[in-house]
Image (cartoon, helix red, strand yellow):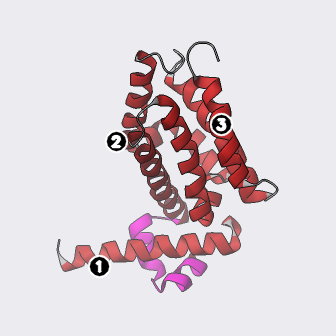
């Protein structure tokens, strides 16, 4: 890598790190070119050069943290020796990630992330294909083994992640839910909704 490329990568990291800090402190309304460049020490010209716009910066920030969350989820599944253990590990890993990265969690569960997800669902899935393929393959293997109910991957994904996302949003925004309690109770409840055969 040339020195110029290295400097460019460092600048991108500075801008993304600063954008998350600003977002965590001031929300999306505070995420302005002036606030990000002041927090990062990077010029507005460099921000536009690397991201094209504040929208481009926000999209890149969302993609960065979505990828990190997916890595955590895939790792949890791959370390599990059964479907039940995988579902339980996935739920706990998601909650741990949100607790460890609260500002990123707020961003990932924001209306902006929802809007981006609806507007660019296919592009997002294509961009994260390397992360999503192991999740789909894991589900497929456990349907074939008879552990998971023979439902489509999208339905199983909704049954597993729907409650987790709902609890995470509530913890992040209202704070009236105990994340530790949810991490203890939800894995079994979710497992019962996706397990094959009699419960």
- Asked if residue 171 shows in the view, the reply is yes
Residue nearest the viewer, comparing 134 with 39: 134
Estimate the x, y position of residue 198 in percent, counting from the top left. Answer: 62, 13
- Residue corresponding to mark 3: 162
Q: Name the dominant secondary structure of the magenta segment.
A: helix
Name the mark nearer the viewer: 2 or 1: 2
**Quadrant, the C terminus:** top right
Residue 20 versus residue 43 in the image, above or below: above
x%, y% of residue 145? Answer: 41, 18
User: Which dot marks residue 130?
Assistant: 2
Label 2 environment density (alpha carbons within 10 Å; few <14, some 14–19, many ≥20): few
- Residue at 57 percent across and 48 percent down: it is 92
The image quadrant where one finds the N terminus is bottom left
Q: Is residue 26 left or right of residue 44?
A: right
| Quadrant in the rendering for residue 185 | top right
Q: Which residues are magenta?
A: 34-53
- Element marked by disc 3: helix
Q: Position of residue 63 (x, y in %)?
A: 47, 54
Q: Which disc is residue 7 wearing?
A: 1
Label 1 Cα crowd, 10 Å radius (few <14 / some 14-19 / many 20+): few
Using residue 130 as the reference point, say whether residue 113 is left or right of it: right
Residue under the point 43% across and 23% down: 142
Mark 1 element type: helix
Q: Quadrant for residue 106, please give it.
A: bottom right
- SS at badge 2: helix
Q: Residue at x 34, y 41 (%)?
A: 130
* 191 sits to left or right of 48: right
Which one is in front, 161 or 16? Answer: 161
């Amino acid at each position: 890598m040339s020195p110029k490329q290295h400097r460019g990568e460092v600048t991108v990291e500075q801008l993304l790190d600063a954008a998350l800090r600003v977002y965590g402190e001031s929300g999306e309304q505070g995420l302005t070119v002036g606030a990000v460049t002041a927090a990062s020490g990077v010029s507005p010209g460099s921000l536009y050069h690397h991201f094209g716009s504040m929208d481009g910066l926000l999209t890149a920030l969302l993609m960065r943290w979505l990828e990190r969350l997916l890595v955590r989820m895939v790792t949890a599944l791959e370390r599990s020796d059964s479907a039940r253990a995988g579902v339980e590990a996935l739920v706990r890993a998601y909650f741990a990630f949100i607790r460890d990265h609260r500002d990123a969690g707020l961003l990932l569960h924001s209306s902006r992330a929802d809007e981006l997800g609806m507007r660019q669902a296919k592009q997002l899935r294509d961009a994260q294909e390397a992360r999503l393929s192991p999740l789909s393959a894991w589900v497929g293997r456990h349907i074939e083994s008879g552990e998971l109910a023979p439902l489509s991957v999208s339905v199983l994904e909704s049954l597993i992640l729907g409650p987790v996302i709902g609890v995470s949003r509530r913890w992040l925004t209202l704070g009236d839910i105990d994340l530790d309690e949810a991490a203890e109770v939800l894995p079994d409840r979710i497992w019962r909704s996706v397990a094959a055969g009699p419960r």
